[in-house]
Image (spheres, rainbow, N blue to C red):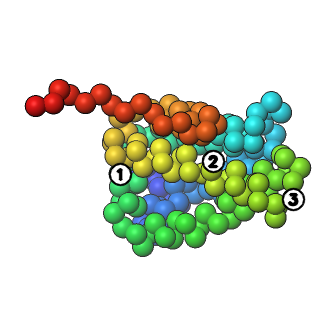
Amino acid sequence: MRDGARNYFATKEDALLLPYPDQAERSVLVAEAVVTAPDELTPLDAVAHAWRAEVERVDADRDEWPARLSVLADHPSPASRVIAMEAGDQRRMVEAIARRTGLATDDPYPTLVHHVADGAPRACLRHWQQLGGARSLVELMDHAVRAVAEGLPVPPAPKAGPRR
């Protein structure tokens, strides 16, 4: 864990579950970045653009993050707490996507964009954690967002070795 991290969190579990003491402020800034992203970006690309700095921060901390993700994968109780803690972040993102698109927050489209966009980092983080941070998380995310934007084409199967 980062030096001094315990100074910012009430418990060790909070230090694990909340990656940064200013997580709520970061969430607000990311949501605002969705709204202010360049007009030529699709809503999905605007969300990916807004998340990029956070993904780069995680990617740069390859000593801590794979271990943090392993603990969460192996212990469902803290992971369920993370899901509950993310509810406010999700609401902010749906509201930001609604503002960007001019749709109402109760229209299903902003929620759909959020859930589709949110699936990309979740899948990439899991894969990245399994690799021990050996590949670039930013590159994995870029690839995932492109795949979603292209309609999720099935990637080519790895070539099998010769049959015996």
User: Which dot marks residue 117?
Assistant: 2
Q: Please report whichever mark, 1 or 2, sits nearer to the chain's N-terminal start.
A: 1
Q: On the rendered structure, is 6 left or right of 152?
A: left
Mark pair 1, 3: CA separation = 39 Å
Residue situated furthest right in the rendering: 102
Q: Are marks 1 and 2 in contact (CB under 8 Å)?
A: no
Instruction: Write down the residue under mark 3.
Output: 104
> SS class of the residue under badge 2?
helix
Q: Residue at x 61, y 39 (%)?
A: 151
Instruction: Write down the residue under mark 1.
Output: 67
Q: Amino acid at mark 1?
A: Ala
Q: Please report whichever mark, 1 or 3, sits nearer to the chain's N-terminal start.
A: 1
> SS class of the residue under badge 3?
loop
Residue 93, image x, y percentages: 72, 54
Q: Amino acid at mark 2?
A: Ala
Q: Residue at x 40, y 42 (%)?
A: 128
